[in-house]
Image (cartoon, helix red, strand yellow):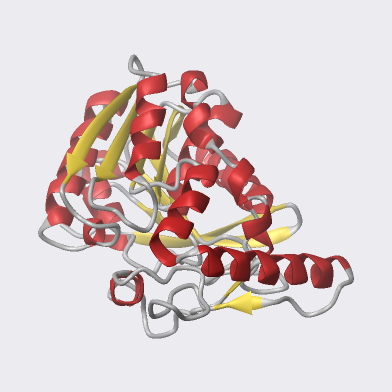
Amino acid sequence: MTARINEVAFESHGTRIRAGHYLPASDALRNARGVPCVVMAHGLGGTRAAGLDPFAQRFAEAGLHVLVFDYRGFGKSEGEPRQVVSVKAQLEDWAAAIAYARRLPDVDGSRIATWGSSFSGAHSVAAAVADGKIAAVSSQGAMMDGLASLFNLIRQCGPVAALRLSAYGLADAVRGALGQGRVTLPVVGQPGSAAALTTPDSEPGYTRITPPEWKNEISTSWALTLATYRPNTMTPRLPCPALFCIATADVVVPPSAMEDGARRAPDKVEVKRYPVGHFDIYVPPTFNEVVRDQTEFFVRVLKPA
């Protein structure tokens, strides 16, 4: 049964954020009161139209409300300049989305979950820690440790790629501070090209899940602070159970960082491992296994029925 999706919007620091609100697909739960809600957003440069609908549909089929939003400056959301990645701003958007989810009709505000993938896999943890009242977290293929990801970039693509990204980031930060046009790069590109992600699987993997209107472009100043963003160290402060879905053959982000985050809070974090790469988690056959595990986790922890 396909879930009904309402197009909704809310404010985040003066910017209108647009989202899809998936209603529980079950007739018995669609109009029930006090149903849990999963809040979702995409990773680096992604939009909700890039492979998130299949996950949201499955969660709605399990009797959950789901709120999937685009960050400010991306996808259907408002905000200028466009395509600017900022950890601070994105976490503000997460906080606004969580607050909005708690106000949705028939949603139980005490049973809100966060779900993230890749860059947003880190945000799903950081947002839950910052909120302090999240009921469940699901994180898949996450960029859980910016410092480890920087070393991974050097290992996978060479020091020149890391230096180039840093140089672009510095130029972008300066131009942004001066109110000038931002310095951007493609999100994904061929190995050796000037792009944020250039592992052999990055371009074919990302473009496999993106819609035709997706813009392969992001700002670069986020790279300057990447090493200091380490949600793996935040896991002991998680206020709830979490599920880490780790792609053990991931070369885009180091799976060891997710393992480290889980080790730091073994009483809170469950781990599922899949012998696949970073982008395989979005498509069958691995998608079927991952979404089954995530749905089981959410139903067990959130108890929608």
Q: Is residue 98 left or right of residue 173?
A: left
**Does 187 appear above or below 43?**
below
Q: Residue at x 36, y 19 (%)?
A: 268
Residue 172 place in picture, x, y as percent: 74, 70
Residue extending farthest to the bottom is 212
Q: Residue at x 33, y 43 (%)?
A: 255
Residue 66 place in picture, x, y as percent: 37, 48
> In which quadrant will I find the C terminus?
top left
Q: Quadrant of residue 167?
A: bottom right
Q: Nearer the viewer, residue 301 or 260?
A: 260
Q: Residue at x 29, y 53 (%)?
A: 250
| Residue 33 makes an appearance in the image | no
Q: Is residue 53 left or right of residue 181?
A: left
> In which quadrant will I find the N terminus?
bottom left
Q: Is residue 46 left or right of residue 93?
A: left
**Does 4 appear above or below 114?**
below
